[in-house]
Image: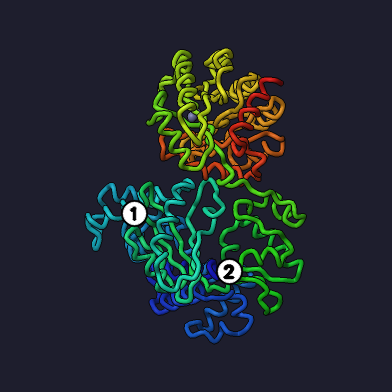
Amino acid sequence: MKNALLSELFEQMADIMEILGEDRFRINSYRKVARIISDMPSDVEMALATGRLAETPGIGKSSLAKIEEFLKTGTITAHKELLKKIPPTLLELLTIPGMGPKGVKAIYEKLKVTSIAELKDAIASGAVAELSGFGDKKAAGIAKGIEFLERATGRIRLDQALEAADLVIAELEGLAGIQRMQEAGSVRRRAETIGDVDILVAANKGKRIIEAFTKAPFVQEVLAAGATKGSAMIRTESCPVHVDVRVVPRESFGAAAQYFTGSKQHNVRLREIAVKAKLKLNEYGLFKGKRTIAGAVEEEIYQKLGLDYIGPMLREDRGEVEAAKNHCLPEAVESEDIKGDLHVHTNASDGNCDISELARAAKKLGYKYICVTDHSKSSAIASGLSPKELGRQIKQIRRLNEQLKGITILAGTEVDILADSSLDFDNKLLAELDFVIAAIHSGLASPREKVTTRTLKAMDNPYVHCISHPTGRLIGQREAMDIDIAAVVKHAAETGTALEVNANPWRLDLKDTHCKMAIEAGVKLAIGTDAHSIEQLGLMGFGVATAARGWATQADVLNTLSAEKMKSWAASKRKR
Ligand SMILES: [Zn+2]
Ligand SMILES: [Zn+2]
């Protein structure tokens, strides 16, 4: 499907010509062609082959020749010629919200500004404000646009993307004519970071839906609004998010969901299978000659390609296509399988509520147990517990368990692995606990050998059941430790130690590919929210998705076990 790319080329030719002050008539006709192609419900290649394109009003002879040239060669000579006439960085100015070709033309001609960096300088010097037709207000607006762009071009976390998707879906949900709606793209695959959020709608009349989206109160900047696609920057509580809404006919919804969910590599594999079977797969459906053999239902696309259905979280071309062919896809772990949370903090360390509040909230979530894992004394900023305080907490937990019904509190700790690889509590105290997780909270920037040895030594301790956030990364904020993850996984298998999947969307640590390594080595995953509040108990789904993306089944996840089985699993390491 080359429609989008082709439309963009025509749009860009129009932009360049406008900046160069060329013929208005031709500029307008190129824009029209761009719009026709992007709104076209079918493949432009097909439209050309059937002769329909030549008959479309607005597509003149010279445009038709350019389209033909593009489909044959992948480029358009006229486009390349135009690009030669301007500095290569000039086009980036057009990506600034609120900057059109007219503004770029003025700034380029009068101030010789050719890039965003130069534009920033020109704004700072006051030169832009002095330009006729600009003024202080407009210059400030452009500066804001640049700031916005720079903030928004980075990838966002999964929780931020889901917040945006939920916002848009809730806004559109009530509209008449919507037959189906769901997210697509990397947010549907639950990837750890997201570029832009894709929402897919099945409906007959797209225009009204796109309008409702682009006029929604949370929209900050409309980037594009056509008959079937709208693109906008929206404001969520945490950050600006780029959202695309696409409207497709119901009979193509499954194919579009498959196509736009990706990943690209996964889709390439699917198209290969289609080609081998003499079929054609695109965002409109799966075709045998001109006959549609699947399109409305995503599952049918896989079925007709001879594959078991592959859930979105597995679509990364990491062996799932082969597994689907051989009927051995993993049955992914789900949130409903989780029986308890193995990593929570109370106000005894740096959490904000007490043990019984957390236990009651966990019971409401349907859990059978939670494990209280406050910090140890070396984590001074987290007001870690002294041995004496932990001893008192254990007694308190035993007492509470006699009063509470329907939920068990396990006594645990998140004990610091110290710089010399020893643990912050002695074994005598650790032996009193039901479940012990150990973690590195300091010296994360140490050399590879150091952080790896610290972790391996901690696993040697028979009382350590799990290593929490094994790489220490904070997404978008702090790099992972330079730790030898293969050695960690191997030693976890050797010592019968679980590895955590920290469910906090800032962490997702282990990450998906590391989860897969661990599972293949026979290591159990322990999913914990690391909750410091009742609200954060709700983060479990992020950890479950990450584990599932790493091919985890229920059997691979420790906290799918009942409280009794959990306790006996924990006891078994001590007997080794
Ligand atoms: Zn921690
Ligand atoms: Zn923690």
Q: Callout 1: helix, strand or loop? A: helix
The quadrant of the image that shows the N terminus is: bottom right
On the image, which quarter does residue 493 sit in? top right
Q: Quadrant of residue 172?
A: bottom left
Q: Which residue is mark 1?
A: 145
**How far across and how far down the image is residue 384, in percent?**
44, 20
Judging depth in this view, the residue of 557 and 550 nearest the camera is: 557
Q: Secondary structure at mark 2?
A: loop
* Residue 391 seen anywhere in this rendered image of the structure: yes
Indicate whether 56 appears above or below 90.
Answer: below
Q: Position of residue 177 (x, y in %)?
A: 44, 74
Residue at 52% across, 53% down: 187
**Relative to 126, residue 387 above or below:** above
Disc 2: CA contacts within 10 A as few (<14), some (14-19) or many (>=20): some
Residue 479, placed above or below residue 1: above
Quadrant of the rendered image containing residue 481: top right
The kind of residue tagged 2 is Lys
Instruction: Give left or right: position of 406 versus 72.
Output: left
Q: Is residue 418 left or right of residue 346?
A: right
* Badge number at residue 2: 2
Which residue shows up at 66% across the image and 44% down it?
Answer: 553
Which amino acid lies under the numbered mark 1 shown in the image of this protein?
Answer: Gly
Ligand 1 neighbours mark 2 (CB distance < 8 Å): no
Q: Which mark is residue 436?
A: none
Q: Is residue 139 left or right of residue 426?
A: left
Measuring 63% from the left and 51% from the top, which residue is drawn there? Answer: 314
Real-space Cα distance between discs 2 and 1? Answer: 30 Å
Which quadrant is the C terminus positioned in?
top right
